[in-house]
Amino acid sequence: MEKKYTVFRYLAYSLEILIIYIVQGTPFFLPEILGGRPVLLIPVALTIAFYENEIPAMFFGLACGSLIDIGTGGSIGFYAFMLTLICFAIGNIFRDYMVINFLNGMAFCGGIITGLICLQFLIFYVFQGRIDGGLYFAQHYISRILYTILLSPVFYLINKHLYKNLRDR
């Protein structure tokens, strides 16, 4: 009986991930701003990891990363691997060392989103020897980073609400 709310919370997170995956993959649902569309599953995985322990956070990171890899089709395994590691670390950090609040959450989201998308650009664009990297980054990746960070507070508030209302008492 005590684990009842945990199961409901995990189901709610899973439903949220599936809905966001569908929204992210639906053409013309979210407008493309300055050449970039947001990667919504990154802040979803990060904000879930703020509230969960390492192992559940790691699996939700794996799920979000796998769906990003499937949805984009270009970097199979990159987001799955990176979000699994990052969400495991965040689950540990916020459980033991940091206080979960809006400013900490948004600072982590901003830094990790920026670092992850820049790393993807470096690995899959620059290291492949393409010449016009700076222009392509400015036209497509900066707006993607900013757009994703701008939508992060929505997922922070959704997952905070799910955790607060669906936890074992």
Image (cartoon, helix red, strand yellow):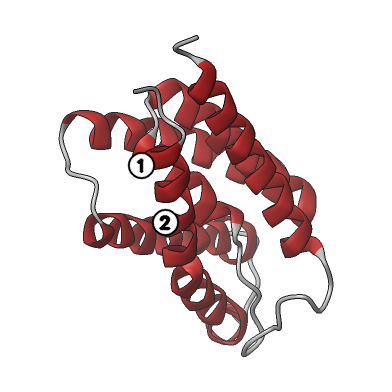
Q: Position of residue 44 (x, y in %)?
A: 53, 51
Residue 70, position as x, y percentages in the image: 78, 46
Q: Is residue 151 left or right of residue 41?
A: left
Residue name at image x 50 percent, y 9 percent: 1
Q: Earlier in the sequence, mark 1 or mark 2?
A: 1
- At 58% from the left and 28% from the top, the residue drawn is 8
**In the image, what residue occupies the spot 78% across and 53% down?**
71
Amino acid residing under circle 2: Tyr
Question: Are the residues flagged by discs 1 and 2 in contact, CB closer than 8 Å?
Answer: yes
User: Which residue is under mark 1?
Assistant: 50
Residue 168 sits above or below residue 80 on the image: above
Residue 13 location in percent, x, y? 58, 39
Q: Residue visible at 45% across and 69% down?
A: 149
Work out whether residue 73 can be spotted.
no
- Along the horizontal axis of the image, is 2 left or right of 97? right
Q: Secondary structure at mark 2?
A: helix
Instruction: Judge whether 98 appears above or below 72 on screen.
Output: above
* Viewer-side residue, 88 vs 96: 96
Near-viewer residue (127 or 18): 18
**Residue positioned most to the right:** 27
Residue bearing the label numbered 2: 156
Which residue in the rendered view is the most extreme toward the bottom? 34
Q: Secondary structure at mark 1?
A: helix
Q: Residues within 10 Å of mark 1 (few under 14, many from 20)?
A: many
Mark pair 1, 2: CA separation: 9 Å
Where's residue 136, x and y in %? 61, 82
Image quarter of the C terminus = top left
Amino acid type of the residue tagged 1 in the rendering: Phe
Badge 2: residue crowd in 10 Å (few <14, some 14–19, many ≥20): many
